[in-house]
Image (cartoon, rainbow, N blue to C red):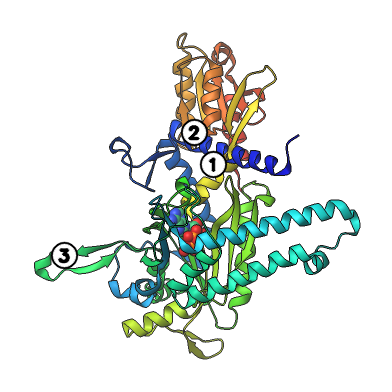
Amino acid sequence: MISPYGEKLKSMAKQEDLFKKIIAHAKEYGFVFPSSEIYDGLSAVYDYGPNGVELKKNIRNYWWKAMVQMHENIVGVDSAIFMHPTIWKASGHVDAFSDPLIDNKDSKKRYRADVLVEDVMAKLETKINKEIAKARKRFGESFDEQQYRETNPRVNGYIQQIEEIKKRLYSAMDKEDMEAIKLLIEDLGIADPVSGSKNWTKVRQFNLMFSTQMGSTADGASQIYLRPETAQGIFVNYLNVQKTARMKIPFGIAQTGKAFRNEIVARQFIFRMREFEQMEMQFFVRPGTELEWFKNWKRERMKWHTAMGIPANRFRFHDHEKLAHYANAATDIEFEFPMGFKELEGIHSRTDFDLSAHEKFSGRKLRYFDSEINESYVPYVVETSIGLDRMFLALMSYAYTEEKLKDGSERVVMKLPPFLAPFKIAVFPLTKKDGLPEKARKIMDGLKSDFMCFYEEKDTIGKRYRRHDAIGTPYCVTVDHQTLTDNTVTIRERDSMKQERIAIDKIAGIVFERLRTK
Ligand code: ATP
């Protein structure tokens, strides 16, 4: 018999295995490659291949459509990556955008000190959940979780341990007291997960911004930074946009673009990269209304995620207990990745922190005259911020499916939402002769201005189907001898593998219908 612990290990191994398969699949089918691979790669930097770039662009367009096209009061910008260095002083990134790092002297591995402590809390949380699951089974219908949490001595003990650790960690982080974090690691007896060693260095603060020089040294070069978030490009353009687009509060500014962070621990494929892309929207509101808008954007953003067709139970909110100094409410939308529930998107009520800081540092007024209440104020901001690469990984994790077919064979199918799939239609002539390729090309020419299409004539139809299942193409169209006489084709749907004989002029309608977003 396998113990529950054994079961858990088995399922963890399975998830790890799944993650490895997704990474291998992403490379084999031209979604994501390690960057600079012929030079052995560059840590935590990735390139997108021909299928990846299509999927990424489709996700970006879906976000843009939902945020900008569907909201008359949201407009876009595309600000430069290089920005005036004082911006990063004003935003707090120069002084405070750092993580505490610690090295293990034996394994030479580097860790984020706060994450090591958080892992201990997560383990305690798992123990609590296990106890609760056991008790629920024992007590059945009458089980009262709240009461159990409060009265069961073991569970209560774990809860108190978590509270105690949290208090020490948050207080040390707030005071930037690196020695207190080190002491906490020692008191908790945390060992290096790789080597088991407790031989740690001191904890040091490490700023995550990449810097470089602008201009030649002779000219008096200045140090500038690669932006660690796209948001500041929106804040510093607030007035330009508000005036030129004649926006009235409440209104939003959206931007997608690259961001750079010199992450200490950059693992887990495209989940945590040093160069990545963000899709951010800052929504400017009247002070005092921000918490209502925060609720609104929580709802709206969750709707965006679930409208893709991914089951709602793969997402959850994680409201922040500990708020950043500039926020008065914050939540993460977490997705169940193969390595568990992790942050996919952040929604923050940032008060007037950013605009006020830019007023102070730039000496320019960044205010809004609200004619409805006859008052001028610095607007409050609610931000939604999602990593495009993380969304890409979420979709790959959801879509990757291994199936055993009735005839005993197996297939890997990427069950991507059809409107996001890299290609929408693959067109195949049954054979390479008898005028079938010419006919197929003609059909493809009629479709390609509306849809990303793929033409293939190599290998058997079965093999061609498998290749398109593997990249998630929702429809394959086969041209055979009958097509030449009656202008009909076989259309095959990816998920059901159902085939239907239809007239050529019906293809576009069927595909359009399937691609429609809610
Ligand atoms: P984390 O806690 O995972 O480091 P964060 O809270 O620092 O993330 P934010 O600053 O809120 O992240 O950035 C908004 C979004 O940008 C995140 O929800 C995530 O999707 C994405 N993101 C942040 N850092 C990275 C990274 N290094 N690689 C890929 N995506 C990232």
Query: Can you tell which mark lies on residue 25?
Result: 2
Q: Secondary structure at mark 1?
A: helix
Q: Residues within 10 Å of mark 3 (few under 14, many from 20)?
A: few
Q: Which residue is label 1 attached to?
A: 396
Q: CA distance from mark 1 to mark 3?
A: 42 Å
Dots 1, 3 in contact, CB < 8 A: no
Residue at the outermost left position: 218
Q: CA distance from mark 2 to mark 1?
A: 10 Å
Q: Is residue 95 left or right of residue 1?
A: left
Image position of 366 with respect to 297: above or below = below
Q: Quadrant of residue 506?
A: top right
Q: Is residue 392 left or right of residue 276?
A: right
Q: Which residue is label 3 attached to?
A: 215
Where residue 195 appears, as percent x and y from the top left, is: 47, 48
Q: Nearer the viewer, residue 298 or 170?
A: 170
- Please give the name of the residue rendered at 43% of the width and 84% of the height, measured from the top-left corner: 367
Which amino acid type is marked by label 2? His
Dots 2, 1 in contact, CB < 8 A: yes
Dots 3, 2 in contact, CB < 8 A: no
Which amino acid type is marked by label 1? Met
- Please give the name of the residue rendered at 59% of the width and 83% of the height, measured from the top-left corner: 288
